[in-house]
Amino acid sequence: MAETLTLTASDKEGIYQELLPQLTYLMDDQVDDIANMANLAAVLREAFGFFWVGFYRVSGDNLILGPFQGPLACTRIRRGRGVCGSAWDRGETLVVPNVDEFPGHIACSSLSKSEIVVPLRCRGAVVGVLDIDSDQLNTFDQTDRLYLEKICALLYPQT
Ligand code: SME
C-alpha cells in the first residue's frame, strides 16, 4: 500500500471522500485490531490536524485507552461516564460542540474544546469507541458523524 496519503480536497467532506477508499485499502484483516486502530488514528490526525484522536476498548465495565495520536490521556473510563462512556452506554455517536456544556465531561486536557465519540460495533456489540478532540469549539457536525461511522465500520467489516 502507499505509504503516504493522497489528499487534494480542501473541504472536510472532500477529504473524507478521498480518505475512505484509502482507509479501506489500509485496513489489514490479517492483523489484530490494535494495528488497524493505530493507523486509523494516525491518518485522521494527519488528514485533519485534530488535537487528539484515539480509541478506547471495552474491558468489563470500563473503556481502556488504546492506540492514539496526541497528548497523553486518561487510561480508564467507566461505562456511562464522560462523553466516551456515555456514547458506549447509549450505543450512539455523540457530537459535543462545547465540552464544558456536557455534564460529566472528562477533561484529559484543558485544551480540548469540542469532541465527537463514535461507538465501534462488532457483531452487534459495542467493543470500543473512537474519540476525537478539537482545541476549537464546534468542530464536529453531522458530516463528521456520517464519515467517521463509515470509517469505524471498516474495523469490523463482517458486521
Ligand atoms: N473527554 C473524554 C475523555 C477522553 S479524552 O478526551 C481523550 C470523555 O469525556 O469521555
Image (tube, grey):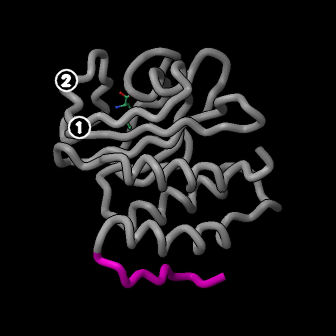
Identify whether 142 is placed above or below 88.
below
Query: Is 24 included in the stretch rendered in magenta?
Result: no
Q: Is residue 4 left or right of residue 141?
A: right
* Identity of the residue drawn at 79% across and 60% down: 29
Residue for badge 1:
97
Find residue 25 and report its image quarter: bottom right
Q: Give SS at disc 2.
A: helix
Q: Is residue 89 left or right of residue 123?
A: left
Q: Is residue 132 left or right of residue 43?
A: left
Looking at the rendering, the stretch of residues picked out in magenta corresponds to: 1-10
Pointers 2 and 1 in contact (CB under 8 A)? yes
Identify whether 46 is placed above or below 110.
below
* Identity of the residue drawn at 66% across and 37% down: 121
Q: Give SS at disc 1.
A: loop
Residue for badge 2:
101
The quadrant where ligand 1 appears is top left
- The image shows residue 155 at horizontal and vertical percentages of 67, 52
